[in-house]
Image: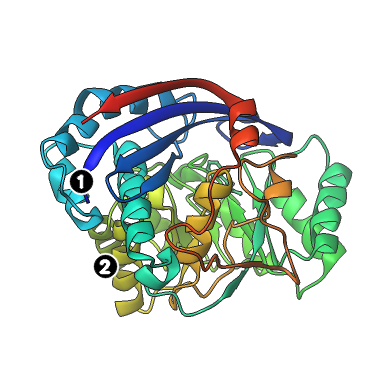
Amino acid sequence: MKLTGVEIREIRLPLVAPFRTSFATMTERTALLLRAVSTDAEGWGECVAMVDPLYSSEYAAGCADVLRRFLIPALGRHPHLDAAGVGPALAPFNGHRMAKAALEMAVLDAELRARGVPLARELGAVHDRVPCGVSVGIMDSVPQLLAAVAGYLDEGYRRIKLKIEPGWDIEPVRAVREHFGDDLLLQVDANTAYTLADARHLARLDPYDLLLVEQPLEEEDLLGHAQLAKLLATPVCLDESITSARAAAAAITLGACSIVNVKPGRVGGYLEARRIHDVCAAHGVPVWCGGMLETGLGRAANVALAALPGFTLPGDTSASDRYYRTDITEPFVLADGHLPVPDGPGLGVVPLPDALEEVTVDTEWIPM
Ligand code: OSB
Ligand code: MG
């Protein structure tokens, strides 16, 4: 397989409803899509970076810049690489994991399509469908939140994650637990909104029997998370802090988390995501698949990853209609609280040409 070039495409998709976290309110999703073209097949990659560097330091325009200036040209110097060679070829460049992940995903999709192998099989999946949770944004009022959660439970979602921040934490959790009962699988995500000085406040979540509290403290504060974990009954899960398999091993060894959210974009790709799965499995640490409001392309790959044996908690792998009225692929539809794992070669899905054209803002071809 010889790569001949990569297309960078910017798309903009309206969200079905505003999504508010402790760091931003999103009303639309801008994303970069990559199309890797080789002599044997084409492959698609999705970059999960957002417009602003608020979740992490990466942002869409910065990803496009590092891809066209450094990452794609680096692959151009080794045009016969397979996907396993992409990480090593890009390793001299520091950081930029979301950009690297998108490029590796596109090459991996092309390679697997050429070989006729589904991504799920390549990664080591053991299920043909995965149970799904949903991430519920911060709302203006508790009644509005209860109505949103009721709607998702009616649709069949198996687990609810509430976004929290100071001023929107104990009350909404108490209300959801009391309204929907003890059997509801419930967890919260702070996106770094607290400090260790909030430990006593966060311990007030303990009576509500949460599955986990996700990323309460800032990304670099592994030691703080280890101290916090000793003060909470609720298990601490890390998202932003886990940037690699090495970071996962360090966090687990330090006692900074007992559960890990795996997001392929955040860690540099699906192959590193699988290594995190393996490290966590070796330590007996459960993992689940996070999300970044992906289109059907990233969703297909996330569902494949979530079918690995260590993914023992429902992920933020929601159906297409939780995000978009019209997805760019055939929509992922929830059935009995699950999404099916695609079984075609590569991602097993492709963009629908008309839907893709409709949302495209810009395209750029980078020849090898
Ligand atoms: O922290 O998990 C997060 C969305 C964007 C950025 C960060 C996060 C999220 C979500 C939604 O929680 C996950 C999804 O449904 O894709
Ligand atoms: Mg998170």
| Residue 125 visible in image | yes
Residue occupying image coordinates x 38% and y 53%: 109
Query: What mark, if any, has residue 253 been given in the picture?
Result: 2
| Mark earlier in primary sequence (1, 2) | 1
Q: Amino acid at mark 2?
A: Thr
Q: Amino acid at mark 1?
A: Lys
Residue occupying image coordinates x 22% and y 58%: 246
Query: What mark, if any, has residue 2 been given in the picture?
Result: 1
Residue occupying image coordinates x 28% and y 54%: 244
Instruction: Give coordinates of residue 307: x percent, y percent.
Output: 49, 72
Residue occupying image coordinates x 17% and y 41%: 90
Foreground: 10 or 152? Answer: 10
| Residue 283 visible in image | no
Q: Residues within 10 Å of mark 2 (few under 14, many from 20)?
A: few
Q: Quadrant of residue 275?
A: bottom left
Drawn side of residue 88 relative to residue 6, left or right: left
